[in-house]
Image (cartoon, rainbow, N blue to C red):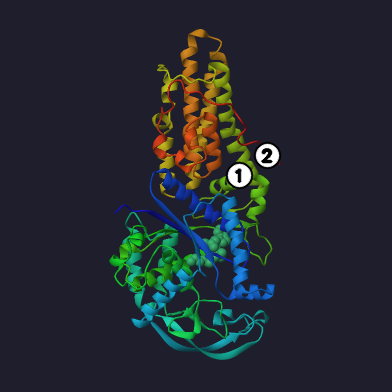
Amino acid sequence: MPKTFFITTAIDYTNSAPHIGHAYEKVLADVIARYHRLKGESVFFLTGADQHGQKVQQSAEKAGISPNDFVRSTTDKFIDLWKKLDVKYDAWAETIDPRHKQVVQGMLQRLFDEGQIYKDKQSGYYSVRQEQFLTDKERGADGEFGPEWGQVEFREEENYYFKLEQHKRWLLNMIDKRSKTERPFVIPDFRETELRNAVEKLSGDLCISRPKSRLNWGIELPFDSDYVNYVWFDALTNYISFAAYNPKIDKYESQPQEFLEKWPALQIIGKDILIPAHGIYWPIMLHALGFPDEAMPQLLVHGWWNLGGAKMSKSAGNIVDPNALADKYGAEALRYYLMSDIATGKDAEFSEERLLTRYNSDLANSLGNLLNRTLNMSGRYCGSGLANREVDDEKLNEWSTTKSLDIDARYRHGMESFDIDAALGWAIHFATFCNVAVETFAPWKLAKDANRKSLLDAVLYNLAESVRTIGILISPVLPKAAHGIFDQLNWKMELSGKEERFSLADAEWGKLPDGHVVGKPVPLFPRIEQ
Ligand code: MSP
């Protein structure tokens, strides 16, 4: 059965509007998905919105509307943004979807029937304002609960618990076993180490319910209508409920083909939700449901965009709005910045000035300028008709992706290891190399010497071929610009505007035929003045 490349992101909380961190994760996933399509693989990219929970219930109350209306309007803001940023997913997960509810309830019922979920009494200090039980961690230096918790009272509450701790050994073994393979459970390495340490310390089971008196905006427990599920069984399950998983079928191997051809997924998440949700609860949930070890997903954990050295947060008022940036500079400029100025796995500092600098230097100066010169000189010196000539010139012979710079291999390596910044860097490096070659060969000088016509033709051909290759390599990050390049090269016009226009196999040297006529230059990345 041919496997589909299945990629997911975290689903975003819909208690407020999207910010730059959300946009980063979506674009990252979109780029990886597009790269796999570029390789000719079938891809299933699932993302969506996390719509239940206390915060949503509170925000809706504040706004004076129903939670349902509230999540509709916030969710639509996310959808509009993904459209604006050209994030092309194959399926959209909304946790209020009845199909999703059914899967969550089916899973809970099965685990309950199998004795993996039990009811227990909890007692302790409870903050009425924050609507949560407090632990000793919440006590201040004086041993008291601070004023931020409002009225604190002693309470007893019954809830449902999922047996977590009993799977601890299994989880440690799974992480270790996978660590040595080509598909470690967690990347990068240092996050795997963090997770392992956290699992070592795991104790206790997971509370998975809230009485309806406290929270009603959630999925009702199928075995007790006084409770709703809280929170992770609802949120995490989206990854399988929107991929055709059927909780009524015990045996993993008997799941629908539609599910088996996709799962397991590559799951992209931020560093804040690795421990405990994605790194502990999620694999244990899957394991408890009978997923074999080979069917555990892979977690790609990215870092954070900070602002002024601090975490962005609504309360600190330092949120960067991706909509405003896309309106101001264009979606592609924003995509490029988000992919080129952070190393996957690490944090980065957001700076609008850096966005401009990278755009102007890499896109306007290097790539845009190269395209412009190539088409201009082709028009001027060979009437835009390319001639693919065999010329024995040492420097010229070196000038191809595979022969000298090995860009194609380096690019692939970067993309395969999710180092998008490195992969992109090689494509831009190639453009810079070509700009240097223009100066070295000086076509304007060659044009004055009839004896050097062949070399002139060959240089112009190489330039066009290089630009075409770069167009393919940047297409996952800059799909619109890649189309612009192909349109101006007058290449694959029958597929104009379609993603199928680009294929990594075409990034092979010499595909432009002898006599191909290129188009006129149109500025692709006009400089943005600061
Ligand atoms: N709803 C949960 C995830 C459920 S997944 C089953 C959630 N939502 S979130 O809206 O708070 O965050 C969504 C994603 O955005 C997370 O992966 C989070 O790490 C990421 N980011 C939030 N702020 C970020 C930055 N400042 N920078 C980069 N990514 C960050 O968590």
Task: Confirm or reject: label 1 Cβ below 8 Å from ligand 1.
Answer: no
Asked if the residues shown at circle 2 and circle 1 are in contact, with their CB atoms under 8 angstroms apart, the answer is yes
- Residue 18 visible: no
Q: Residue 295 at what x, y percent from top left?
A: 33, 63
Q: Quadrant of the image for the N terminus? A: bottom left
The answer to which quarter of the image holds residue 378 is top right
Closest to the observer: 418 or 192? 418
Q: Is residue 412 left or right of residue 48?
A: left
Is residue 171 positioned above or below 269 on the image?
below
- Tell me the amino acid under the disc marked 1: Ala
Residue drawn at point x = 63 percent, y = 42 percent = 357
Residue drawn at point x = 66 percent, y = 76 percent = 61
Q: Quadrant of the image for the C terminus? A: top right
The answer to which quarter of the image holds residue 263 is bottom left
Is residue 157 positioned above or below 471 on the image?
below
The numbered disc on residue 333 is: 1
Is residue 148 positioned above or below 529 on the image?
below
- Residue 13 visible: yes
Q: Secondary structure at mark 1?
A: helix
Q: Residues within 10 Å of mark 2 (few under 14, many from 20)?
A: few
Q: Residue 327 at what x, y percent from top left?
A: 66, 48
Closest to the observer: 277 or 323? 323
The numbered disc on residue 528 is: 2
Residue drawn at point x = 43 percent, y = 28 percent = 400
- Tell me the amino acid under the disc marked 2: Ile
The tag earlier along the polypeptide, 2 or 1, is: 1
Q: Is residue 34 left or right of residue 153?
A: left
Q: Residue 142 at what x, y percent from top left?
A: 63, 83
The numbered disc on residue 272 is: none
Give how far apart the Cα atoms at labels 2 and 1 are: 10 Å
Residue drawn at point x = 60 percent, y = 66 percent = 72
